[in-house]
Image (spheres, grey):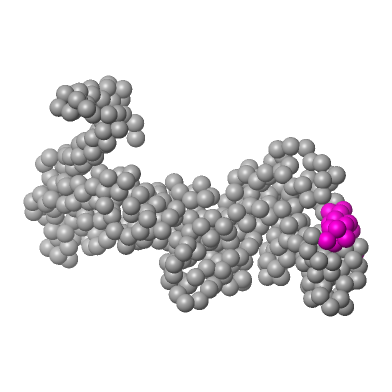
Amino acid sequence: MEFSTELTDAVATLFKQAIVEIVAQQPDSKAADLEHGLRHLLKQAGAQALGQGLSALDEPYPEAHIACPCGGMAAYQFRRTAKTFTVFGWVAYRRAYYLCAQCHQGEYPLDQCLGLEPGQVSAGLASLLALAGVETAFEEGCELVERFLLIEVSDNTLRKETQTFGQLQAQSEQDWQAESQDAAYLQARQRTQPAHPKRLYGSIDGSHVPIGEEWRELKAGSWYEVEKVRNASNSEVGQLDELRARNMRYYCDITEAETFGRLLWATGVQSGADLADEIVFVADGAAWIWNLVERNFPAAVQIVDWYHAVEYLTPIAEAAYGADSPKGKVWLERVRSALWAGRVDQVILACQQWEKHARAGEAARKAVTYYTNNARRMDYARFRTAGYQIGSGTIESGCKQIATQRLKRSGARWTMEGARMTAKARAAWLSGQWDQLSALRANLPLAT
């Protein structure tokens, strides 16, 4: 919505006069005082203007009868006053009220036309409340809302709107799943060939979050592309900062792997994975992750995250030689270099030498199993030559932002539904999908 320059100038002139009057009455006022006072004035004026504007939008001469959804006719009764909770606080307005003689239900055409729900939070305020709810704890979010908007809301209101946005995201995901299972829809996409990524990356990970008195795994995934930010130096073992992720899109749920697999495929279709020239998955070595990848995207390039792969070596070196031992550092550097070069067979042999060692045996056996199971996903020399990103920092960051920073705050205990919906809403915010959810929230059907 845009306003003319003339209207903006006229309103600014009125507020300018208010500032002059404030300073005249309070000569010691500072700029901060003027800002604070003007904010309160804008809030009060906004509430009045919105209420009067909504009332003015109602028909000045209401029709005697209107059609009722039940099929009957509703007769005009009188104008009723209602209030809605907006970014300016509570706003009162008047509109025509009709009553149907057949179903005895009241009708308010203005409410239906503008999406107003008396006694409830407006769509515009709901978007801001939900945003506060995905960013911080609900109680803290209420304090921030009061500071920013000069209105008081309860933590229950903030929670409700946040989880409503999560429910809208969940409904969108269900719609995506239906589309992704529709053969005709997928075939039509193949024929029309919409814009699609040349090389699309996917990553999956999990993080445990508190649900009641137990901990459950929040599974999270991301789709993204990468861009080069500097030239790679192949001589630097473990140097991964030449590529950077962009266009990240996150999704998540607390569910079994099989169910999460359907979400993986559906979000992939939304990101163009079914049309991409090449798909690359980067993740840790968890079996459930690679089972999902092979089932849904069997042609994808599979890469075990470099940092997860190399972290199995340090415990062996420290147990075998002692922490900070020069010999241990030499062994570690030699084996890391072999892994960096993709010589996984040499890495396995180096670890096998310590399998019967009293202190290093357990760590060595874990490493041998890990490298043996994921050998084909650790051809790092070839991956780097092909220009692939071999680090899963994108999904690691996503898990941190969704699970750690929001769901695992000190003292947090969630219901299953509360955690799922809050996580989904936060994932949508991190993915740049907030405006779409705000539009869905504005179009929700009014309560009867």
Residue 406, relative to residue 247: is it above or below? Answer: below
Outermost residue toward the left in this view:
78
Spot occupied by residue 157 in the image (x, y as percentages of width and height):
31, 59
Q: Main secondary structure of the magenta part?
A: helix
Residue 196, relative to residue 359: is it above or below? Answer: above
Residue 289, relative to residue 75: is it above or below? Answer: below
Tell me if 50 is positioned left or right of 129 in this view. Answer: left
Q: Quadrant of the C terminus?
A: bottom left
Q: Quadrant of the N terminus?
A: top left
Residue 369 visible here: no
- Range of magenta residues: 325-345
Spot occupied by residue 324 in the image (x, y as percentages of width and height):
79, 60
Spot occupied by residue 22 in the image (x, y as percentages of width and height):
18, 28
User: Quarter-wise, where is residue 130 in the image?
Assistant: bottom left
Q: Is 334 included in the stretch rendered in magenta?
A: yes
Q: Is 383 included in the stretch rendered in magenta?
A: no
Front in this rendered view, residue 223 or 103? 223
So how many labels did they put on this image?
0
Front in this rendered view, residue 193 or 274? 274
At 58% from the left and 61% from the top, the residue drawn is 220
At 19% from the left and 25% from the top, the residue drawn is 27
At 23% from the left and 47% from the top, the residue drawn is 89
Front in this rendered view, residue 161 or 362? 362
Tell me if 33 is positioned left or right of 238 in this view. Answer: left
Residue 70 visible here: yes
Tell me if 435 is positioned left or right of 103 in this view. Answer: right
Spot occupied by residue 158 in the image (x, y as percentages of width and height):
34, 57
At 22% from the left and 61% from the top, the residue drawn is 71
